[in-house]
Image (cartoon, grey):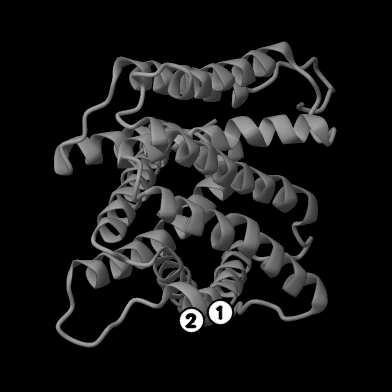
Amino acid sequence: MIGPGQLALHLAGLLVMGVGWGGNILLAKLATSLGAPPAGLAFLEAAGSGLLLLLVCWLRGRLPRLDGRHLRFYVITGALGVAIPNVVIFHAARHLSAGLIAILMTLIPLVTYGLSLILRIERFWWVRAVGLLFGLLGVTLILAPSSSLPDASAAHWVVLGFLATTMFAMQNVYIAHAWPRDGDALALSCGGLIASALMLAPLAWFHEGFIGFIPPWGAIQWAGIAMAVVNALMSALFILSIRYAGPVFASQTAYLITIAGVLWGMLLLHERHSLWIWAAMLAMCAGVALVTRRRPHPAGEALG
């Protein structure tokens, strides 16, 4: 039984993660709007976060392992959870509001559950199935009405953003299936980030370019550094939340990232959204509430 003090600490952790990761969406929007190359920005965030976590792992005496099984895990999680979707999202950030990108992040737990059903990792439960329908309703409310988006040409960027969130969900399913039995969470996260940075380096070098760090630094450089630091801190905090409060509790971060991302955009970028977008956000949040709801089970039966 969690005491009031522990519950307050866990809730504070959720709030910090929501504000931090929601703020990173705003920073990505700011940096790309100022001309930051998406691949270069994604490389900077991944490499910076990975090196910071590597320092933490070294101080703990638990560096990432380099055998074949762990290396495969780093490459797949780095590709699905960082390299490919972040480049897509950072490109989309040039055309979509920070608030809308934050709303798309709400789809991650919904798609994760849908993929888990297809792969028979999860058992069907009508409550969670209704949650998936709410998520589909949210996407429809964004794409279908002609007045939902300020520019009709932005619709294909919404679709690409949805594909990026699908990759995040694929990473979640893969982690649940392939997590090394003796794996350390921080070391595995560190390995995935560094692997993603190595994958992004050729794209940035040959195609889009890196972010330069010759003084004086501007808003792009500071935004990229802030994104790396925030991502490292939030990743570590998320792992601690899963460890001490459980994955279902930690998954509630999706609500707060969406809310924080929308509010950051409204407060600092003066973004405004149509009623369709607000309705979509409510539908998706309701979907997450249903999908992450704990399934009732008879005594002696494992949780579904």
Q: Residues within 10 Å of mark 2 (few under 14, many from 20)?
A: few
- Work out whether residue 154 or residue 124 is closer to the camera in this orientation and state it: 154
Q: Amino acid at mark 1?
A: Pro
- Work out whether residue 21 or residue 13 is closer to the camera in this orientation and state it: 21
Classify residue 30 as left or right of residue 108. Answer: left
> Residue 26: where, in percent of width, then height?
29, 49
Q: Amino acid at mark 2?
A: Trp
Q: Quadrant of residue 52?
A: bottom left
The residue furthest bottom is 214
- Work out whether residue 303 or residue 83 is closer to the camera in this orientation and state it: 83
Q: In this rendering, does residue 54 appear at all?
A: no
Question: What residue sits 34% from the left and 53% below the top?
Answer: 24
Vertical order, 164 against 147 (above or below): below
Question: What residue sits 49% from the left and 33% below the top?
Answer: 106
> Residue 257: where, in percent of width, then height?
39, 39
- Report helix, strand or loop for mark 2: helix
Quadrant where the N terminus lies?
A: top right
Q: Which residue carries the number 1 mark?
A: 202
Q: CA distance from mark 1 to mark 2?
A: 5 Å
Question: What residue sits 31% from the left and 40% below the top?
Answer: 97
Vertical order, 175 against 149 (above or below): below
Marks 1,2: beta carbons within 8 A: yes
- Report helix, strand or loop for mark 1: helix
Q: Which residue carries the number 2 mark?
A: 205
> Residue 89: where, in percent of width, then height?
46, 51
Vertical order, 304 against 160 (above or below): above
Q: In this rendering, does residue 135 appear at all?
A: yes
Vertical order, 42 against 154 (above or below): below
